Amino acid sequence: MATSVANQVPIAEGLFTWPSNDPRLLGSKCKNCGVVLFPAQSSCPACCTEDSDVIELERRGKIWTFTIQNFLPNRPPYEGPETPETFKPYGVGYVELADQTRVEARIQTDDVSKLHIGQDVELVVEKYIERDGKDIISFFFKPVDEV
């Protein structure tokens, strides 16, 4: 049974467009020097200007670097869908988008042994966990051939 959008909330406001049939991460672009950042920020760490625009980032990128999370992180602070019984290793890394913005994210895949630097990945926005009867929606990247 599909969950209604009314029962879905983003993991944090301002990270991505939601609800959307074409979700995008929201970054910021400095009006002075052009630096693009994720997540969006009002000030620029490169030139210290406080004048930037919120922009939608590209959906596709390449794995810039990654590691495999081979154990269930401690709770707290980690809050995730896995239990000791259901845990499977997953990728975590930086994805470099077309404009060279690097986004730290979880990399979802059916087989972590096939992840590699330079691999084409695409943004997915979907249910991460359930909290207080609501689906918490988050962003991930997946290899393009698995999307």
Image (tube, rainbow, N blue to C red):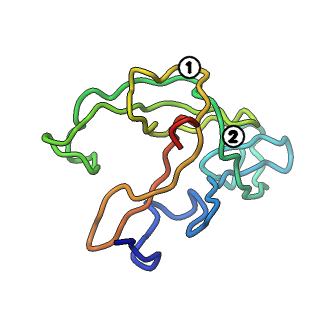
Task: Say what amino acid the circle numbered 1 marks.
Answer: Ile
Task: Find residue 117 and name its label.
Answer: 1
Report x, y in % for residue 31.
Answer: 84, 51
Percent across and percent down for residue 38 are 62, 46
Q: Where residue 70 sits: x, y (%)?
A: 27, 26
Tell which residue pokes out farthest to the bottom in this image.
6
Q: Pinpoint residue 122: horizontal percent, then vertical percent.
A: 59, 42
Q: Nearer the viewer, mark 1 or mark 2?
A: 1
Query: Quarter of the image holding residue 36?
Result: top right
Q: Nearer the viewer, residue 16 or 126?
A: 126
At 28% across and 46% down in the image, what residue appears?
Answer: 78
Residue 89 sits in which quadrant? top left
Residue picked out by circle 2: 45
Is 98 rendered above or below residue 38?
above
Question: Element type at marker 1?
Answer: loop
* Position of 27 relative to 71 (above/below): below
Question: Residue flagged by tag 2: what amino acid is it?
Answer: Pro
